[in-house]
Image (cartoon, helix red, strand yellow):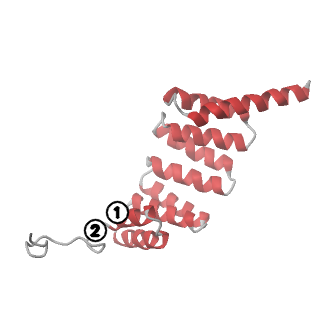
């Protein structure tokens, strides 16, 4: 059987492939440094690629550079304000810094763009839980169940929040 070089087909190595695809692959395989380098390469070639900014932000989150990550997501959103992934990633970076109000604001922007995304609904509910807003959290968990009735986390968290709310009500009596 002839090798690819023998029949004139180009060999694909990381130099021939889209740097964002290489960055994503590196990130998914755990090579965060390579993912960042390849995202930087993609950005230097075409700074208007939101996917390059997003993968760089993800790499920076792994390096615990949440400020840098948020700057990357901000760049992605300046390029494409309708990028749901960028809004979700920005929210996550805010949450990592315990900036729950900002995180919820970003998730709500993502929800405007994709109103039936159970992950976003769950993320908002979870952040509200952390803020002690159990009733409001349950509203989002219930919306999660409307779009994904089999979501075990939403169902369990509603049950736990109801127990917490019951205990709080009993303390007030």
Observer-nearest of 157 and 43 = 157
Secondary structure at badge 2 equals loop
Please give the label number shown on residue 131.
Answer: none
Residue behind mark 1:
21
Asked whether, in this view, residue 102 is left or right of residue 40, the answer is: right
Observer-nearest of 47 and 58 = 58
| Residue 10 image position (x, y, % from top left) | 16, 72
Vertical relation: 37 (above or below) 93: below
Observer-nearest of 101 and 29 = 29
Asked whether, in this view, residue 1 is left or right of residue 84, the answer is: left
Q: How far apart are the two marked residues, 2 and 1, measured between alpha carbons?
A: 7 Å
| Residue 11 image position (x, y, % from top left) | 20, 72
Q: Residue at x 67, y 48 (%)?
A: 100
| Residue 33 image position (x, y, % from top left) | 48, 73
Asked whether, in this view, residue 130 is left or right of residue 38, the answer is: right
Q: Residue furthest top?
A: 173
| Residue 50 image position (x, y, % from top left) | 41, 58
Q: Residue at x 67, y 57 (%)?
A: 97
Q: Residue at x 61, y 66 (%)?
A: 64
Residue behind mark 2:
17
Secondary structure at badge 1 equals helix
Choose top left, top right, bottom left or bottom right for residue 15. bottom left
Asked whether, in this view, residue 115 is left or right of residue 97, the answer is: left
Q: Residues within 10 Å of mark 1 (few under 14, many from 20)?
A: some
Q: Residue at x 64, y 33 (%)?
A: 156
Quadrant in which the C terminus is drawn: top right
Q: Residues within 10 Å of mark 2 (few under 14, many from 20)?
A: few
Q: Are marks 2 and 1 in contact (CB under 8 Å)?
A: yes
Quadrant in which the N terminus is drawn: bottom left
Q: Residue furthest front?
A: 1
């Amino acid at each position: 059987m002839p090798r690819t070089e023998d029949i004139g087909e180009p060999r694909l190595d990381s130099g021939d492939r889209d740097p964002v695809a290489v960055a994503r692959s590196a990130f998914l395989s755990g090579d965060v440094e390579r993912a960042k380098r390849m995202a930087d390469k993609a950005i230097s070639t075409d700074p208007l690629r939101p996917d390059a900014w997003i993968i760089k932000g993800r790499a920076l989150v792994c390096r615990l550079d949440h400020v840098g990550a948020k700057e990357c997501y901000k760049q992605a959103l300046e390029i494409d304000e309708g990028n749901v992934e960028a809004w979700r990633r920005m929210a996550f970076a805010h949450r990592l810094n315990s900036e729950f109000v900002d995180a919820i604001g970003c998730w709500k922007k993502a929800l405007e763009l994709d109103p039936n995304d159970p992950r976003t609904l769950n993320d908002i509910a979870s952040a509200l839980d952390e803020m002690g807003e159990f009733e409001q959290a349950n509203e989002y968990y219930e919306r999660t169940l409307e779009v994904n009735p089999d979501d075990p986390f939403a169902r369990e968290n509603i049950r736990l929040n109801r127990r917490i709310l019951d205990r709080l009500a009993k303390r007030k009596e």
